[in-house]
């Protein structure tokens, strides 16, 4: 049996650390029994209960407060929290309404009991950012012969914090730069005021500590928060969470991948040998193809440049913690809402709905990333877009309406799709059986959801406005790049580095995410991009690699113009960015050219909060290794 590929580039190293991952961390002490994150769920499928924040006890400031203790159990992470006298282990489904005000405390119990977990809220000192560790800058030749400022970051002490993914209030409220290790209490208190304008829908929460977010989310430290409209459109019994996360203990779905280590070694050697050259002149909105830093052949191994099934194996997932396929039973002939959340760190999924014979069924998508196609915050389920497949990348959420006839069973599948020659082998898996039974009693009133007129969606309206006012829209090119880099000196091992760069600037250089904080400041001194509130920009997102990426920006949604579901523009906050295209390289056939893929998005800063926040790849192995930038809205 061939061992799993030693990929530097995603989940394999998160779940199965092997070569090139850097020096192994010191062995951790065996966790105490009370630190167990629980056994995998088994038996009859039970949907997770929900926690309404307005029912929580009040803190010293008179606000409802939720306290989440963060625990580690070998490779797993989990939250522990109390409701009354009952202690729960797991990620609560947090329910709020627009305008809700509550406090959220994150207590770091990873290395032992946090002194700040059980004290009064007014006894907690404010948390501060954790200074980045010293890292040596090493320069290499990068994209279009521009320089790379590589800064390999050593593994930090296990820190944690929180990010309310999709939150549209001020960044300072859920400041992702804060560290639970910045005070002796090892706990941070976040004061969350949900804007009245926050769209109703399904959201995601997770830690955002740089260098460790992927490991923690892959280990289970993430969950769902829901914003309910003032008058919910669907009964609680018809409202279902479909939370996709990795199986623990970790398993891969294909055991026979070749070991491509020799290709990685050749790529690193090639990168280290590149000499400085004059940067190439280029059109930032139509960049040229550029050589791949990964060879087609080495040590008897050959990579097929036209392959689409990848060289990495995927991880097995669960639904709501249960082995797949799980089964949920619903009253037949009645509207049901599936809140689909991709809670993985690095695994985009292409979803389909099928009947018992395997025939594809239309999926009625009412919202993506809590952005209703109706544009109606009071009636977010009033309109739907019918699609035959749906890309749900890491941290994406989609609210899908289904109506299963009595006696029938529909199945939600993750399906095969062509991710690229260097990406992941995407095998099909049934995730959830939805079984319709004979309904008892009077059926609830139908939601009456209707197909959306695409021209009436908020996304289509923004596209039309921008096309009618081209002179007032700034264009910006953003490019994703990645490299295999050699060891340097005594402290820098062989490693992979990832970058997201504003390549509109003809003098750009690729640099790692490495914020510096002035004394007394909770936000970084430097921003990679500064924009004016009230402006609209069109960003050209180029993927100059042969790995998929996922673009995400905090505090706001954006409109994806290209490649949306059913080919339509869509408002989202997390976007799948496909691989580039390999082309022959006459100068060096071993290293083919990559023509970057392009997805255009509209960034509407007219309603974004002022402040400093981040944009990044939400493939968290990439983010943790540098693929993140800082934006300031002034």
Image (tube, helix red, strand yellow):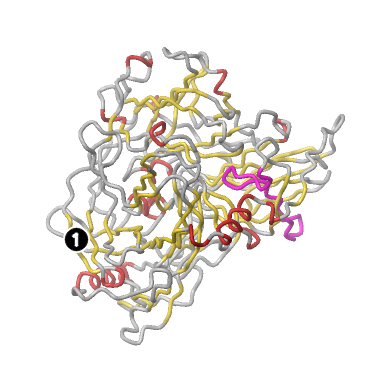
Instruction: Give 83 or 569, whichever is nearer the viewer.
Output: 569
Q: In the rendered picture of this protein, how many numbered marks are placed on residues?
A: 1
Does residue 289 belong to the magenta stretch? no
Residue 339, given in percent of the width and then of the height, sits at 63, 41
- The part of the image, by quadrant, that contains residue 112 is top left
Residue 329 as seen in the image, left or right of residue 120: right
- The residue labelled by disc 1 is 487
Where are the magenta residues, as a range? 354-375
The secondary element bearing badge 1 is classed as loop
The correct choice, above or below, for 166 with respect to 268 in the image is above
Residue 73, given in percent of the width and then of the height, sits at 38, 34
Q: Residue furthest bottom?
A: 586
Residue 130, given in percent of the width and then of the height, sits at 25, 36
Residue sitting at x 20%, y 33% = 519
Residue 346, given in percent of the width and then of the height, sits at 45, 52
The correct choice, above or below, for 158 with respect to 11 in the image is above
Instruction: Give 75 or 367, whichever is nearer the viewer.
Output: 367
The correct choice, above or below, for 442 with respect to 466 in the image is above
- The part of the image, by quadrant, that contains residue 468 is bottom right
Residue sitting at x 76%, y 55% = 356
The quadrant of the image that shows the C terminus is top left
* Crowd around label 1: few <14 · some 14–19 · many ≥20 (10 Å): some
The correct choice, above or below, for 168 with respect to 582 in the image is above
- The part of the image, by quadrant, that contains residue 284 is bottom left
Residue 507 as seen in the image, left or right of residue 406: left
The quadrant of the image that shows the N terminus is bottom left
Q: Residue furthest left?
A: 490
Instruction: Give 227 or 36, whichever is nearer the viewer.
Output: 227
């Amino acid at each position: 049996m061939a061992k799993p590929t030693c990929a530097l580039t995603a989940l394999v190293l998160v779940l199965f650390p092997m070569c090139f991952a850097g020096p192994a961390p010191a062995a951790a002490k065996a966790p105490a029994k009370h630190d167990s994150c629980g056994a995998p769920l088994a038996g009859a499928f039970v949907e997770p209960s929900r926690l309404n924040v307005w029912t929580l006890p009040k803190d010293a400031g008179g606000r409802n407060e939720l306290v989440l203790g963060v625990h580690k159990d070998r490779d797993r992470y989990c939250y522990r929290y109390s409701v009354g006298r009952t202690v729960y282990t797991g990620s609560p489904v947090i329910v709020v309404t627009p305008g809700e005000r509550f406090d959220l405390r994150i207590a770091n119990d990873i290395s032992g009991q946090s002194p700040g977990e059980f004290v009064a809220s007014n006894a907690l000192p404010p948390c501060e950012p954790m200074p980045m560790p010293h890292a040596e800058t090493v320069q290499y030749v990068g994209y279009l012969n521009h320089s790379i400022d590589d800064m390999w970051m050593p593994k930090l002490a296990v820190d944690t914090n929180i990010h309310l993914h999709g939150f549209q209030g001020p960044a300072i409220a859920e400041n992702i730069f804060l560290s639970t290790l910045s005070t002796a209490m090892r706990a941070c208190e976040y004061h969350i005021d949900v804007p009245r304008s926050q769209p109703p829908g399904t959201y995601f929460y997770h830690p955002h500590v740089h260098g460790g977010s992927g490991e923690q989310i892959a280990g289970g430290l993430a969950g769902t928060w829901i914003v309910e409209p003032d008058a919910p459109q669907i009964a609680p019994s018809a409202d279902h969470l479909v939370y996709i996360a990795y199986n623990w203990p970790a398993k891969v779905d294909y055991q026979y991948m070749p070991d491509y280590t020799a290709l990685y070694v050749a790529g690193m050697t090639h990168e280290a040998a590149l000499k400085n050259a004059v940067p190439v002149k280029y059109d930032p909105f139509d960049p040229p193809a550029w050589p791949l830093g990964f060879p087609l052949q080495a040590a008897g191994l050959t990579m097929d440049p036209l392959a689409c099934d990848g060289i990495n194996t995927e991880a097995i997932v669960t639904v709501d913690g249960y082995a797949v396929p799980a089964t949920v039973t619903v009253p037949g002939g009645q509207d049901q809402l599936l809140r689909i959340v991709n809670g993985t760190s690095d695994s985009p999924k292409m979803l389909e709905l099928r009947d018992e014979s395997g025939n594809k069924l239309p999926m009625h998508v009412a919202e993506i990333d809590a952005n209703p196609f109706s544009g109606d915050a009071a009636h977010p389920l009033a309109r739907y877009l019918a699609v035959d497949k749906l890309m749900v990348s890491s941290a994406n959420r989609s609210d899908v309406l289904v109506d299963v006839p009595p006696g029938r069973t529909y199945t939600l599948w993750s399906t095969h799709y062509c991710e690229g020659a260097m990406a992941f082998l995407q095998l099909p898996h049934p995730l959830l059986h939805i079984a319709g039974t004979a309904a008892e009693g009077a059926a609830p009133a139908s939601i009456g959801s209707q197909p959306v007129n695409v021209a009436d969606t908020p996304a289509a309206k923004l596209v039309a406005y921008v096309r009618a006012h081209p002179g007032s829209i700034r264009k910006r090119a953003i490019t994703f790049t990645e490299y295999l880099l050699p060891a340097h000196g005594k402290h820098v091992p062989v490693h992979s580095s990832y970058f997201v760069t504003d390549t509109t600037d003809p003098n750009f250089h690729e640099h790692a995410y490495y914020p510096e904080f002035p004394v007394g400041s909770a936000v970084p001194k430097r921003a990679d991009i500064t924009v004016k509130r009230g402006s609209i920009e069109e960003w050209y997102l180029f993927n100059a690699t042969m790995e998929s990426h996922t673009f995400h920006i905090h505090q706001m949604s954006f409109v994806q113009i290209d490649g949306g579901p059913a080919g339509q523009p869509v408002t989202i906050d997390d976007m799948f960015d496909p691989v580039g295209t390999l082309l022959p390289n006459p100068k060096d056939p071993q290293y083919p050219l990559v023509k970057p893929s392009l997805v255009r998005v509209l960034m509407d800063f007219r309603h974004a909060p002022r402040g400093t926040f981040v944009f990044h790849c939400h493939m968290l192995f990439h983010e943790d290794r540098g693929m993140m930038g800082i934006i300031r809205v002034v």
